[in-house]
Amino acid sequence: MDVFSSVFRSARPPVAIVGAGAVGRVMALRLADAGYPIRAVVSRTGSRADALARVVGAPVAAASLDAIPRDVALVLLCVPDDQLADVAETLTGVRLVWADVVVAHTSGAVTSEVLEPVEAEGASVLSFHPLQSLTRADDASALEGAYIGLEGPPRGIAAGIELAVGLGMRYVVIPAEAKPRYHLAAAMASNFLVTLLGMVQEVLASLDIDRRDGLAMLEPLLRGTMDNLASRGPEEALTGPVVRGDVETLRSHGLALRQHLPQLVPAYAALSVEAVRLAVRSGRLDPARAEDVLALLQRMVTTPLPPKGTDRPPVPPSVEAG
């Protein structure tokens, strides 16, 4: 492709992977599967570098950036955010023809500006963030259908687009000033969902349902919810007592939490408030009824919690009265 060829000398440029953790491993596997020759794996942990190099057929496994072969045209930095600046500075001492090299990092939060030292040497730079939750147990298929978040100067973005296409992935271009909001959305979608399901496990555990069994029991519900989200969007996918304005059911939820899991009351109330906003926005919850729901949620949070160690605390009058 023309744009790709203007940055790289070949359609499948030789690659050096820096960092052999979860992201580095999965990215290396995806690149290798797509036909990109992995020339080197560099990691502070020598055993990880050796293991990954063997899997992807890289001839070089090393702990030093100096070991990167001279024919490498793409250096992919898959290291923790707080190491990027030091790695970028150290890279400037590597004898590469920087005008022919693209340096990308995989951070979702840090902009490509952190790569300024190698950009000053003539390299094209960008951030190339896989919008996916990855673990060391994952393989290349974990990135199937995932988006890549691209940010950087025009030449780096052009290389990133072609790289994403070469990997069979989709992409979205993010302005540098919007990177914190982009990463915020990703973190909320992944981390808060995990946190929410941890809360759900606590509720089910209070019923003597094993935590793993509880998640298995909920899996069809979660899949159905995701299908509804994909086809209809959040406004139409929302179901349950909030969108119905069902104050009595919400009151019973609040009482159950206060009696058995009082630590979850603030999170439940906060999430329910956001559900109210979504329900009103969808046009399915009358604003007047929404005020009744919000008033109940406020009482859930402000009514003093029962003393620690109380087995069956009395029902707070302000909550019971509704």
Image (tube, grey):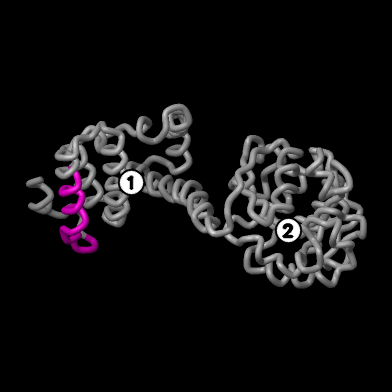
Above or below, 271 relative to 81: above
> What secondary structure is found at the residue carrying circle 1?
loop
> What secondary structure is found at the residue carrying circle 2?
strand
163 to the left or right of 241: right
Q: Which picture quadrant has residue 12? A: top right
Residue positioned 52% across, 52% down in the render: 182
Query: Which is nearer the eye, 314 or 272?
Result: 272
Q: Which picture quadrant has residue 100? A: bottom right
52 to the left or right of 259: right
Residue type marked 1: Ser
Read off the magenta span.
293-309
Q: CA distance from mark 2 to mark 1?
A: 51 Å
Question: Is residue 9 in the magenta section?
Answer: no
Where residue 125 is drawn, which disc sits there?
A: 2
Query: Which is nearer the eye, 21 or 150?
Result: 150
11 to the left or right of 217: right
Q: Earlier in the sequence, mark 2 or mark 1?
A: 2
Residue type marked 2: Val
Residue 34 location (% of width, % of height): 79, 38
